[in-house]
Image: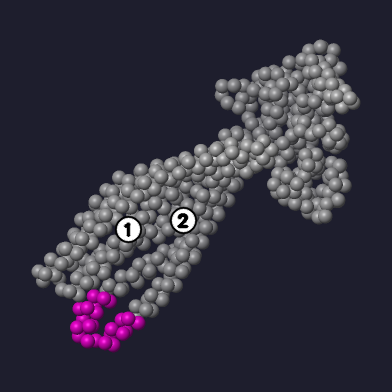
Amino acid sequence: MLRKFLSYYKPHKRLFCLDMLASFLVSVIGIVYPMVTRSMLNDLIPNQKYRMIVFAGLTLLVLYLLRFWLRYFIQYQGHMMGVRMQAQMRREMFEHLETLPYRFYDNQETGKIMSRMTNDLMDISELAHHGPENIIICSISVLVSFIYLGTINWTLTLFIFVCIPFMLLVVCALRKKMRDAFMKSRLSIAEINASLESSISGIRVTKAFTNAEKEKEKFEVGNNEFVEARRDAYKAMGQFHSSTSFITDVFNVVILIGGGLFLYAGKIDFGDYSAFIVSVNLFLNPVMTLINFMEQYQSGVTGFERFLEIMAEEPEKDAPGAVDAGKLAGEIELRNVSYGYDEDTDVLKNVSLKIGRGKTFALVGPSGGGKTTICHLIPHFYDVVSGEILLDGKELHDLTMESVRRNIGIVQQDIYLFNASIRDNILYGRLDATEEEVIEAAKRANIHDYIMTLEKGYDTQIGERGVRLSGGQKQRLSIARVFLKNPSILILDEATSALDNTTEILIQQSLDELCKGRTTIVVAHRLSTIKNADEIAVIADGHIIEQGNHEELMRQKGVYTQLYEQQFRANAGYSMEKTE
């Protein structure tokens, strides 16, 4: 872990060295004051060397001006180095998140991921700046000041040194306790962020069902856990700091008594004793800085561990020797495919089907039967447990994922639109498209006329998840995106199930236009929308139980017929109610 952390300093070696040099000079300048004090008390004042007193004072002033500039450099440029390292880690994490498979996001909450990318990396940034400065410079300061104190009086210096092992014992004893407490605290913060993200994203549902109190209760659970976690962390911190501070207080008592006895016995003169009292802080301050640094160290290390946890997640990888699929014709075949989202349960069980180029294949059946799973397996969002999937006769694993997905367009029930302009959302289908191509895609999706009624037209911002658009408008925008992509294979996963009948008819016209010349897989609960499909498969409990076109399935008088007649009667009853 240390080697990985140090690798982030490489792009900033020059700035790092300057930062360490500046910190070192600050420490060296700090030791000048007690040296001047000792000289004044022992020589300059008793011998009335007034010019030298003024010269020494002015020299100190110049050095303090230099230290002023050095501290500014350390605080500004040193922190900027940490920020740039933080930005690099954030960039790497984001790029890595983009490569992770669907399975990772099935088990992760967005708020927790965001917590790792913000709070954790902020603490890592602070550690990156202050860590080397505290460890290296304070260690040098302790050594230099110890040697200087030894030149004044070795016996008193050894008295101080004897107390150091006791301080180290306290640090070692409480370090693990602090680390565990801070890790628990980080987890509780991640829980709060996850709860907050969920509640804010679902605020409209909360208001619609007047469940604000319930959301407050859920949030308060995480909030209380955070309070308890921070209590443990601060308790550990309190034990740590109070114990180490007590030992430093003992230092001062030892120096006061020992120095007083030495002065009384004539083993040290007043000037040296005064200089020793002043100089001992040069020894204690970096020691205390190192001790207090443990809190920041624990925060940074736990944050870096959580960063590495994400980076250790296995990304999606093409199989060795995988080739670019090029432009697919659109033939799809599943051979004895089985898949389960966990090891204990198979959602699909030995499913086999074949879809010809340019054909429309519909999947129907009860929820949880495996329809959407098939739609996820074809673009290689998940790996099959057994069996194989072929596109144009080529095994899916022999093709690169990017090239496969480039040939597939997906329109789902749950539309995700970015908080950007209408143009940007359509362009997501093909980022290098021209303005004319964007407009043509919008026209084919029957959304262009509406866009032109807006004050800013294609530059209109649609809000988070397209909140400023109606359900039908969002769906048409997603269809325009797929038109622009122009894929060989189209997957419509409950694309109109969330729309009212009137809007569904309008959207269906756009979808019919979109399906022309493409191999299309349609998942639908409303069987009236897939009557004209070339082939229909009824899926239940992970198996294909019936297959054929609409007329063939109706003649079988099986599950499909029952589903169709139930929907027909329900629709007929609804129409009669409206007529009455």
Q: Position of residue 239 (x, y in %)?
A: 32, 48
Depicted 168 relative to depicted 503: above or below: below
Q: Position of residue 312 (x, y in %)?
A: 51, 40
- The quarter of the rendered structure image containing the C terminus is top right
Please give the residue where the numbered disc 2 appears in the rendered image.
Answer: 126
**Horizontal side, residue 419 vs residue 155: left or right:** right
Residue 563 shows in this picture: yes
Name the foreground residue: 399 vs 529: 529
Marks 2 and 1, Cα distance to the nearest angstrom?
Answer: 18 Å
Q: Is residue 414 left or right of residue 33?
A: right
- Identify the amino acid type marked 1: Met
| Snapshot quadrant of residue 277 | bottom left
- Sequence order check, earlier mark of 2 and 1: 2
Secondary structure state at the residue bearing disc 1: helix
Is 45 or 491 nearer to us in this picture?
45
Q: Residues within 10 Å of mark 1 (few under 14, many from 20)?
A: some
Which residues lie in the magenta part?
36-58
| Viewer can see residue 312 | no
Check the image and report above or below for 280 versus 110.
Answer: below
Is 500 contained in the magenta span?
A: no
For label 1, the residue is: 288
Q: Is residue 255 above or below residue 168?
A: below
Q: In x, y percent, where is residue 529?
A: 83, 27
Q: Residue at x 82, y 21 (%)?
A: 570
